[in-house]
Every structure is written in structure tokens, then in C-alpha cells.
Amino acid sequence: MIVGRSGPDAMDSLSGPLAVAVALLDLIAIVHVWCSRIELGRKIVWSLVILLLPVVGVVMWAAAVWPFGKARL
């Protein structure tokens, strides 16, 4: 008997909620970028980074907007 073949794997059961969480964080980050006072070009660049690199883009955005972040939006 092979273990794991009869039911869903642990990663399969987590992939849906994880994808929803990443999508929500992306949406929050993009809304925050577009509500900020930075110029239009930077808004477009930040939005593209967040959309094209969902996890890495949100981490970069969070590092930029936190109080200890060097980059300011």
C-alpha cells in the first residue's frame, strides 16, 4: 500500500487558502500603492512588481512601508 495516494495531499488541501491569502495581500498592497502620494510612474512600477511577483512583491512592498523601511511610498 502506497501512503498518500488514497486522499488529497497536505499541500493540495492548503494550496487554495494559500492562494486566496496571497491574492488578498496583493490586493491590499496595490490599493495602498494607488492611495499613496507617490508619482504615477512609481505607482505603475510598484503595481507591476506586486502583480508579476506576487509573494516577493508583497514582501518588498511590506519592507518599504514599514516604519524601519528605507524606501518610502
Image (cartoon, rainbow, N blue to C red):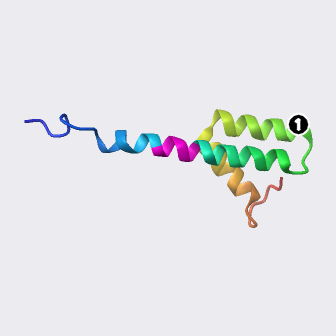
Residue appearing at x 18%, y 35% in the figure = 6
Residue appearing at x 73%, y 62% in the figure = 66
Using residue 34 as the reference point, say whether residue 68 is left or right of it.
Answer: left
Q: Position of residue 10 (x, y in %)?
A: 31, 45
45 is higher (above) or lower (below) than 72:
above
Query: What crowding class fits label 1: few (fewer than 14 Cα within 10 Å), some (14-19), or many (20 or more)?
Result: few
SS for dot 1:
helix
Count the numbered circles shown. 1
- Which residue is at the front of the view, 14 or 61? 14
Residue appearing at x 36%, y 42% in the figure = 13
Placement of the N terminus among the 4 image quadrants: top left
Q: Position of residue 23 (x, y in %)?
A: 60, 41
Name the magenta segment's main secondary structure.
helix
32 is higher (above) or lower (below) than 2:
below
26 is higher (above) or lower (below) than 66:
above
Q: Position of residue 31 (x, y in %)?
A: 76, 46
Question: Can residue 18 be found in the magenta stretch?
Answer: yes
Using residue 69 as the reference point, say whether residue 23 is left or right of it.
Answer: left
Question: Can residue 12 be found in the magenta stretch?
Answer: no
Residue at the farthest bottom position: 67
Using residue 38 as the reference point, say whether residue 49 is left or right of it.
Answer: left
Residue appearing at x 75%, y 38% in the figure = 47
Q: Which residue is mark 1?
A: 41
Q: Magenta stretch: give its range.
A: 17-22
